[in-house]
Image (cartoon, coloured by chain):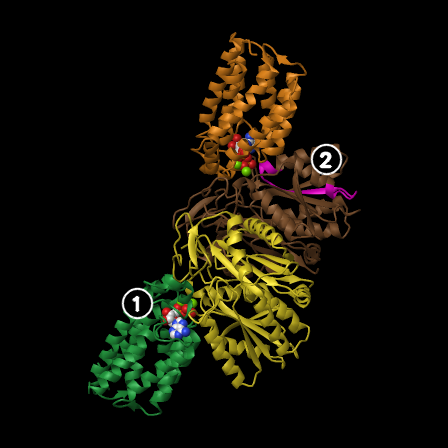
Chain colours: A yellow, B brown, C green, D orange
Amino acid sequence: MKKLINATDDVVVEALEGMERAHTSLKVVYDPKYVVRADAPVAGKVGIVSGGGSGHEPMHGGFVGMGMLDAACPGEVFTSPTPDQMLEATKAVDGGAGVLHIVKNYTGDVLNFEMAAELAAADGIDVEAVVIDDDVAVQDSSFTAGRRGVGATVLAEKICGAAAEAGRDLAAVKELCERVNANGRSMGMALPSCTVPAAGKPTFELGDDEMEIGIGIHGEPGRERRPVASAAEVAKMLVEPILADLPYSEGEKALVFVNSMGGTPLIELYIIYNEVAKILAEHGVEIARNLIGPYIPSLEMQGCSITMLKLDDEMTELWDATVSTPALRWGA
Amino acid sequence: MKKLINATDDVVVEALEGMERAHTSLKVVYDPKYVVRADAPVAGKVGIVSGGGSGHEPMHGGFVGMGMLDAACPGEVFTSPTPDQMLEATKAVDGGAGVLHIVKNYTGDVLNFEMAAELAAADGIDVEAVVIDDDVAVQDSSFTAGRRGVGATVLAEKICGAAAEAGRDLAAVKELCERVNANGRSMGMALPSCTVPAAGKPTFELGDDEMEIGIGIHGEPGRERRPVASAAEVAKMLVEPILADLPYSEGEKALVFVNSMGGTPLIELYIIYNEVAKILAEHGVEIARNLIGPYIPSLEMQGCSITMLKLDDEMTELWDATVSTPALRWGA
Amino acid sequence: MADGTTVTVDDLVAWVPRFSEVIGEHADELTQLDSAIGDADHGTNMRRGCRAAVDALAAAEPVDVTGFGRAIAMKVISTVGGASGPLYGSFFLALGTTGGSAPSMDAAEPIAALKAGVEAIRSRGKAEPGDKTMLDALLPAIAAMEGSLEDGGSLADVLQAGTDAAEEGMRATLPMLARKGRASYLGERSIGHQDPGATSSWLLLRSAAETLAP
Amino acid sequence: MADGTTVTVDDLVAWVPRFSEVIGEHADELTQLDSAIGDADHGTNMRRGCRAAVDALAAAEPVDVTGFGRAIAMKVISTVGGASGPLYGSFFLALGTTGGSAPSMDAAEPIAALKAGVEAIRSRGKAEPGDKTMLDALLPAIAAMEGSLEDGGSLADVLQAGTDAAEEGMRATLPMLARKGRASYLGERSIGHQDPGATSSWLLLRSAAETLAP
Ligand SMILES: Nc1ncnc2c1ncn2[C@@H]1O[C@H](COP(=O)(O)OP(=O)(O)O)[C@@H](O)[C@H]1O
Ligand SMILES: Nc1ncnc2c1ncn2[C@@H]1O[C@H](COP(=O)(O)OP(=O)(O)O)[C@@H](O)[C@H]1O
Ligand SMILES: [Mg+2]
Ligand SMILES: [Mg+2]
Ligand SMILES: [Mg+2]
Ligand SMILES: [Mg+2]
């Protein structure tokens, strides 16, 4: 394993130290660990807290700031954070208007956020939670833990962050978050896997001519293994299941988010985006907004994921609103 | 080789198509190839053109836009663009105030930009060129092609772009660019190398416990091969030669740019940044600004580079000025 | 001290370092199992949590079963993370609550406390037997212990029966199709791999047998 | 047609597809050499440029040497990229200019034209003999051709002498320490590898021998 780290046990803390040193708009608390807006709590504003395993940077710490998250709780690499983190973060961002937890649907995240919400409620804080489950690779049935939360999380955080900044109340921000989730769908794939520092070797091994379709963001294997294919074919394998799951009527608009799993360079993301755009044009779907880059990667995994969000005017306006975080920044 | 591409010959063109589809603020011309601001030429403004081999995205196409580049000329992967590209781009952005070429010191880039400048001058356009050579890994002597241009290029493009936007004339923008270059120093390293699509296998092979110190951005090997080391040691190996080459007096301010070579995830960049900050604190250097991310990578190479720019008030102000490009965006 | 029928707080307190020790020995194996059908962190998670629990316990010096459960649970919950953190945390919390505010447990009490712990895992995680989770080691273990108790087994017999059943249950997860947790995403491909959580649960019971009725 | 002393524009035009062919055959090897001390693109660059030059030449149908040189040079410059594009482009441009606006060259003229091409590479790239570049194949080749010409060699002899000297010069780059281009960044580590540009230059002369005086 070759990584730019010191000890595997110190990866998360040292990266947080780096973030703290780099971004004066953020404050980092170490025990328990969370990243929070330096100006938190913002009085009268709904607070938004997210969190999850580390190794997906910039998610979530890089999305803390004006117009997006109030705080983020990083777990160990690919491991959910613990309830004490979310509890303290929730207290730190409660400006009196309540706090929304945006949770990715992984058993660990859900259980830990659940415990935190119970504890915060006991402390008298108004907490709501929305569980994001946009990954169409997973069959959503009582026989699984349900769909995973992946790319739509980034979009929900941006859009809900803007709504909270605009002064909407907790119920409205929660309803919006559920709407983003209901209209968001994702699917991802990997070429080679990645290596969790503490594990020291790749999570799964792929043959020289294999790729893994339907992976999640924790380096876990996916729906099926296939021979490697062209960008055009890969785009099709990812977009078709999304459209099958949430069809678009002619003229409906989408935000298309092409995400690198980490090790796939931007030049390839643009090639994939180009193919996605061609497929969607055939389906009469207008791409009204896009986001292209490594915003929710899995360490250095090679591959990509595609997220589509069916936009309405309100979501579009909130997407365009000013945001000022280390990873997403416009209008400020 | 596993890449999200169609045919290796189509990589650059298809990525440009993707860029064009994704960013309405840009226009892409295909024959010869260049990316240009949709509103070019901006009357009365000095035009700024850069270019170089592809595979370093977002550089340079992702830096085209208000407050940064007017046009970028992409070569094939890791191959300089050709003079006809720079000539046409130069014509397209000339708003009557002349055009600055920002060139990285690679023989191919220099020769091709030189030819383009000769041709543009013959067409009556006022062209100046600045060659960036900030890479301290290369000994600058008559026995080499001189230092390579690497990370400082990004900083020069941002700062000169702001100056041009503010209405400075060609001589002033050129002088500023030379000043950025004179005050910028970089050094990089790689863990594994990357694979040029057309070559099909890694440019150089490293043993399981080796790293390459002093690499350039074209996937070429560097100054020396060493056993892999901790983030703290790597930071030291990169920062010390920079400081040795351009010492800082107590209290002098730096912009620190920690760049991913592509395959190194953000969590590791923050760990490196943390170590760099500690080293600089020991040397009494204040980090006034920073940039952390894959802004001048080499495809999916794992590793990082560090660029330090000694800041004066003018450069700092220009760095902070509004910029609106696909890859760098603030204040707009 | 264990006298063959009684479980004292000191016995419980001895259990945790032993559990931590065997988790340490098996950490790589647990991570290995988790890399086949999960995300390669179960061993790391458990080792981190167990070490912290050992320290917490030494600092807390609990005097009753409830105090013991609470001290560990809070530490496990705040250090393990992942799915297993809240699950094992809930286990110890419920074990302590059911064990009560006495310095020891007698006769059927220890098994009742263990059962309450397992039920807490079930209600927090909402998994069913056969879902390929830690419950597939723990539920058969509870059943076996209750059976052994009814048959008049000594505490040592009872705990050994539980350990054996847990081991068997753990092995039985191999052919199962996962329906809960991260492994469920694999569908058919989860078949043929032993569940990491069931494996750590077997170690939990094995170390209980070794320390509560040595 | 070549009659043993004259080089016609048709001969020159035949040279380019042959050069393109041998570049195609050696492209992987050239890229391989460039990956040892450069950036693994010399073969790809040259193949792309040669193919384009062949097409350009077919379209341009040049009638004199200058027109030939210009048609190729512009295409090579605009398709090869890298360091070698402007260098080989300058070569053909100068070759054409020196060859003049006649439909053929006689006696010493072809060698003078080749020499002008090589000098153009030298002045554009500012490399010196021994810097481990294409000049280390080309300069000895010019010297050998001039010598053979003085000794009264036929055009075929002269070009063969040039090819042999280029091959020797190419091999002589192996122990050299690179001082120009990308390979110079390697310093000592450039030693022990043959220069890719010197290799393509040998192929340039070899294909000239094969087509200009077959
Ligand atoms: N809903 C659940 N109920 C009971 N046990 C579960 C449940 N989900 C997961 N588990 C157990 O947790 C184990 C995985 O733990 P761990 O790897 O530490 O967490 P994570 O899956 O979050 O990475 C699984 O092997 C399984 O035994
Ligand atoms: N200044 C120079 N003068 C002459 N030849 C040079 C010079 N610089 C580089 N070369 C030649 O160019 C070759 C490399 O060409 P190529 O790989 O196509 O370009 P690049 O180095 O830009 O990738 C080298 O092997 C060398 O022979
Ligand atoms: Mg986990
Ligand atoms: Mg090149
Ligand atoms: Mg796990
Ligand atoms: Mg090259």
Q: Which residue is mark 2?
A: B120
- The picture quadrant for ligand 5 comes to bottom left
Q: Decide if residue A62 is in sight here.
A: no
Classify mark 2: helix, strand or loop: helix
Measured from the top left, where is residue A165 in percent x and y? 66, 72
- Residue B257 located left or right of residue C92: right
Distance of label 2 from label 1 (alpha carbons) = 70 Å
Residue at 26 percent of width and 72 percent of height: C168
- Residue D135 located left or right of residue B226: right
Return the mark for residue C98.
none
Q: Quadrant of the N terminus of chain D?
A: top right
Residues beneath discs 2 and 1 located on the same chain = no
Depth check: give the residue in front, A290 or A242. A242
Chain hosting mark 1: C
- B146 in relation to A147, above or below: above
Crowdedness near tag 2: few (<14), some (14–19) or many (≥20) residues, C-alpha within 10 Å: many
- Residue A10 located left or right of residue B151: left
Q: Say which quarter of the image contains residue C133.
A: bottom left
Residue at the limit of the structure toward the bottom, as seen here: C102
Give the magenta-colored segment's residue range: B92-109
Q: Which residue is mark 1?
A: C26
- Residue A206 located left or right of residue D197: left
